Amino acid sequence: MKKYIKYPLLLTTFFLLLGCEEFLEPKPDQSLVVPKTLNDVRALLDNTVVFNVQTAIPYLASDEFILSDAGYAALATPYERGVYLWEDDPFEDQPVADWARMYTQVFYANVALEILDKYHAGAGQEADHLRGTALFLRSYAYHQLLQVFTLPYQREGGNDSKLGLVLRDVSDINAPAKRSNLQETYDQVINDLNLAFALLPENILPKTRPTKAAAQGLLAKVQLDVFDFQGASQNAEKTLQRYTGRLDFNTLNVALARPFQPFNQEMIFYSALLTPGFMRSPEGFVNSKIMSSYEQGDLRKQAYFLDRGQNRFTFSKFLTGATQFFGGISVGELQLIAAEGFYRTGNEVKSLKYLNELLEFRYRKVSFKPVLLSGQELLDRILEERKKELIGRGIRWSDLRRLNQFEGSRIALEKTINGQTYRLEPGSPKYSFPIPIEEIVQSGIEQNPRN
Amino acid sequence: MRLLVALFTVLLYTGAHEICGQTTSPVNGSVVDIASGQALAGAMITAEPGRITVVADKNGEFNLDLSPGSYVLTAQFLGYATFKIQLRIPLESSLTLQMSALELGLEEVQVLATGYQEIPKSRASGSFVSVDRELITRRVSTNLIDRLEDVTSGLILNRTGDVGRDPISIRGRSTLGRFSQPLIVIDNFPYDGSLEDINPNDVESITVLRDAAAASIWGARAGNGVIVITTKSGKPDLPTRVSFSANSNWVAPPDAFWNPLLSPEDYIDVERMLFNTGFFNATENNPSRPVLSPVVETLILARDGKISGAEANGIIDNFSRNDLRRDINKYLYQNQLNQQYSLGIAGGGKSHAYRVGFGLDENQENVVGDENRRISLNIKNDFSLMNDRLKIQTGLYGVKSTSTGAGVDPNSLQFNNASYMYPYARLADDNGTPLAVERDLRAGFKSQALESGLLEWTYVPLEEIGRSPQKSVRNDWRLNFGANYQILKGLSAAVQYQYWENRSSNETIYAEESFFVRNLVNSFTQLNATNGLLSYPIPKGSIYDWSNFNSGSHNGRIQLDYQKSWADKWDLTMLGGTEIKSLAAVNLMGRYYGFNPEFYSSLPVNYQGQFSQYNNPFSASLIPNRDGQSKTTDRFTSVFANAALSHQKRYLLTLSARKDASNLFGVAANQKGVPLWSAGLGWTLSDEGFYNWNALPYVRLRLSYGYNGNIDRSLSAFTTATTVTFNPITQIPYSRIVNPPNENLRWERIKIINGGLDFENKSGTLSGSLEVYRKAGIDLIGIAPFAPSTGISLFTGNNAATNTTGFDLNLESFNLKGTWNWSAVFLLSGIREEVRDYKNEVPVLNLLNNGASGLGGTYFPVVGKPLFAIYSLPWEGLNPNTGAPVGILDGEPSEDYRAIVTGATLDNIIYHGPARPSFFGSLRNNLTVRGFSLSVNISYRLGYYFKRTSVEYDPILLGRGGHSDYALRWKNPGDELITQVPSMPSPRNTLRDLFYRNSSVLVEKGDHVRLQDIRLGYQLPQNRSWAKAFQRAEIFFYANNLAMIWKATDTDWDPDFGTFRPLRSLALGVNLEF
């Protein structure tokens, strides 16, 4: 009977196992984690598929790139055609990544903030850095959404009666959605950026992670949106003092197909545009007006563009050093914000200083002559440099929204396809794109008027 | 222990003393069936030496007078195994010879296996369907599951709906989530491997558990029904018997012309038209040199004056005479030939029985160069020790499946990444010499590259055959051990254990000369601008892709069984036990570049650098990295109990319960477990004194109620993130949120009520059962669209409920008995499914586009409708002046497609009906005469709809080809009388396409009746001298997918296969036993 002793033994082992909670402890999938630690939060915020991505609509809708008829005919989605020609119903009920992807960033940021509040409420440097990062990234997403899905901030006021964004402070997906007003949205972005600035580190790599300079730089951009030229110029200046890296285009071999290095000195914060097929179309050419404004000796002409002959150029070389379209925060943009901000607050000396600091690194050494303009001519030059320096980043669209509110810089956009001309008037309600239909259906928020 | 004795148990009551002085002594005995104890009248008993023969009387009894001494007694009876016993005469008492029915082809006592116990049909209150050997062997197929189709009441192999994720349904679909497949149980334990690894020849029986009383013992995994498979075992007291079967199955090749594509002429016409509008200018001027078709290249030459217009027309006319599909039929498709062999050796003695099974499947697939092979080995031993008190079973089941592919799939002949190959491509010239076709990049660019020192870049499909051999090997092992010890009379304890392991490996070796390697090496070739030298970030040499999937599980179970009968009236059976399971799976995959098959060596590459592409230096790509790893662990603990109490075999009460707990991620421990239970009643009405309906002497009623469960293991109650190690931008790993928090996550439950009626008429010529059921899905997990501003667009949670009602009717009749035997089996299942609760309103556009099958595992439930349903927009014909499709807007005919589409609501679209059959079943007639048997199965599917596809102009006008209905389009006024296919729009209009694609004119009824299959067998007569070597010998023909008898649609569409057809097959086989 000795050999049957093993059965009771086996039986006992069984019941021991059953009683043992640990048997059910192993993770069902080894790669899964319920994020709790600071490392977990860092991993969430390091998600460059979610973050460091921004809207493409400003690129498609502005006047920087002009499609040939053939290029238009080859566009694959209603979204691309509809946005390019500012149609009344540009999305034809299709999901719109520009909206959904930005709100995914908001969601991730909120998840991160909640974990930090719940498990890491006490201070601590890394927790602060992460809290600052989440606040910065959420503001970045809101700032992107503001450019596309709300009307421009009104210089003449009344922003508390204009529709703003759905602001979300919690990750709870069942929290009701309601559109705030435009003033509230900007207030929240500015407040969060101030908070983030206080928490973020001076330096951290890679450039997909925000620093104090990035927060201050974004603040300057937002302040430019809301016509706070004082704040914008000061913050731009401080950012440039804080971030001392500069990229002199003279050091580049601009003849190369990819002249820029990834994460080069020009970049303060890395973010890239979503890329619908439109942006890769070989039939999308740089607006010849912009192209012709690049002067002799301007290195950017070769550093950014591919000459396709017949005076046609495509935007083919990107600051990212890869195939992504750079849209983040750059030294050049802050120099131009500083130049414009100081000009508009009466400090032409500083304005010229920042403009020339930029141009010195954009022109061949031999052909660079410092700009010595003043008054309206100086402003015009600054705005023209914005077009040339910041092309293909979606910034032109924000500038149109902003500059259309100044007497004298109003401009109507025109695009011609198959002989038919389409116009976008300054101040048109079409400067705010409709909220995607699935959002309206699911949350019932108010739609933007298109007419 | 005698291992291979004879096939019987002898009950000898030997006396204490010999009786002497008599010349002969009487030997009294009887012959009975070993399983049922039924007397075998007419059995022949022979005693040797002396060759004294008697025949058993109508009670199975016989008498022999034999002199004292040693004898061998042989008993023979038709349909039973010959039986021998050695005896010493005289005997003190009578003798019982227990004979075993032959294993093949004969009806056995119906026992229902649940995986925990075997219960006679008369003691079941739940809904079981049993598929016996005869039905399993009726059909010829490599796959086991195919053999259940149209012979298993209530079970359907889905041809519509999300077939890839949901191939089998038992009584409809009980979940809205992705885990919709029945639980497969093999030899008492859930099987985690692939069903393709089960050799049907090793299967003894299959029981399908359909309701709660039958399946709730499987608890949280039983929600979609359970299929219990029992493999063959040896039987005690059975002489060694060898069975052998072999068959060859020829399957007709597919026809490439079933694919509804633009004809070469139409395709060329479109290309010419697009060329004239300048459509191809963008591609032509594209600096990344994308490919242009030969027609466009010819037109460019003509435009640029390099050839004359007449020359161009001549060249293009030649193109139009080619047909890619003709070449595919000729060079790439072939007959499928499946050969199947199986050998079984079984036997048993008093205390030991064994079976060894060996199977070989050799399949030549229908694409040239593709082959499959499966070898299976099955060894089972059963020991009976300690006077039958201890029974031990051991089993070993091993399968090795190998499939090899030549790497040229006709369906993936791509022109570029957006379009299929142009239809006038030629695979070979008139002499059969392989020809190059255009692909990916322009021919001129490719030849320039060759001159610049790059590898040959042309693509010759037929030369690619065998250059990228794919091989996958699956090794699947199961080891079983079971011991059952009878502690007291009626009480026994059992321990069972199973180890399972599956090791799969897939590899593809792309040879250096394959297009895949040449294309990749060339794309990454770097040109140094200063010195003009070429460098190769992807080294020349083969590319070796591999993946390994290894999984293994331990299953253990302890179980107590108790059985008691008392007062001649009461019978009680109870079982209870506990079970534990642990399954781990590790998947690894990767790629070697610069692989040298001779030395088995490879070269490292730089996965982090961005490399310019040779055809487009402005773009930059990372070297494709296939590295991947994953590890998953499933843990379960369960307790279960089951009891059945019957009174006078007339009243039956059953109870069953199970509680499971698992390592479901992020769920608090108290939520991990879910108790599921069921209760059932059985009442043999015809046993009641008051029952006196003579026409129907057997009537039994059953009723059951209870819950089954279903699990979605991908969900979690907490915010869960998964780590992604590949980050091309920063090279820093990051995490991705898999699901947002869901504190209310619960397991799905399915509440089932089942009523059953079993009956048989007086003569036994008609019997059957009717079952009616209602299944309510509660707390079902659904995917709900969410406002994107929440951060997610789709949310998965317990937000849905369904209701399914239906019936299953099963009728068997014996129409003729005697020399001619004619029987028929009629199966009819009716089902009505509807979503009862769903929290979110699904966009109507999703219903129109994807209501029939969902989209990539996302479904669109509508309250009050089945999950898979056909919806359409009302159709008002074609505009007689323009041929534009006309719809309805606000009750008026309209061509405002945008308004029609955006204005579509559930109220103004048409709901046609379910996308899956409401009624299905089969009628199977069996005719036997002398040795011949003929079985014909007619199957039917009724009460459902499908949507035809038709031309969409958007891809056509983008130069990507399209649907062959293009040829039928409206061209001139008047055509609207003969066609419903809209005219070509100008310009492109996606909304017009969308309207037509979803208009009611394309909806058809799916109802149809098929002549599914015919089996003709001939059993060699036993009395012929040349057949004596065999116990049984049968040859048979089997033909499948024979013909459509009737269909509701007038179009040439097959409701289940579209423009394609089920492939006809013809098999020839033999079954031998000796």
Image: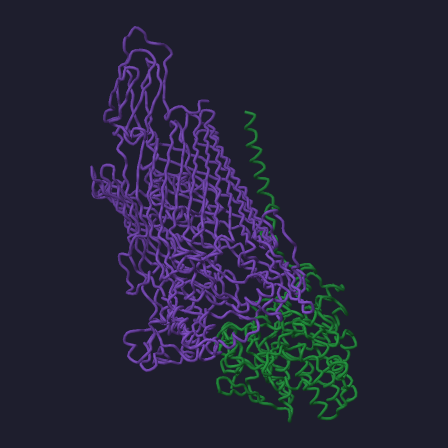
Chain colours: A green, B purple
Tell me if residue A354 comes above or below residue B377 in the rendering.
Answer: below
Can you say which quadrant of the picture contains the C terminus of chain B? top left
Q: Is residue B887 among what the camera can see?
A: no
Q: How many marks?
A: 0
Asked whether B795 or B735 is in front, the reply is B735
Q: Residue at x 43, y 32 (%)?
A: B355
The x, y position of residue B827, in whole percent, is 30, 50
Can residue B411 be spotted in the picture?
yes
Q: Nearer the viewer, residue B630 or B225?
A: B630
Frontmost residue, A420 versus A349: A420
Q: Nearer the viewer, residue B880 or B299?
A: B299
Q: Is residue A256 left or right of residue B542?
A: right
Q: Position of residue B952 (x, y in %)?
A: 40, 72
Percent of width and height locating residue B311? 42, 74
Judged left or right of residue B721, residue A77 is left
Q: Position of residue B123 (x, y in %)?
A: 36, 40
Q: Is residue B279 left or right of residue B23?
A: right
Q: Is residue B711 above or below residue A8?
A: below
Residue B1000 position by quadrant: bottom left
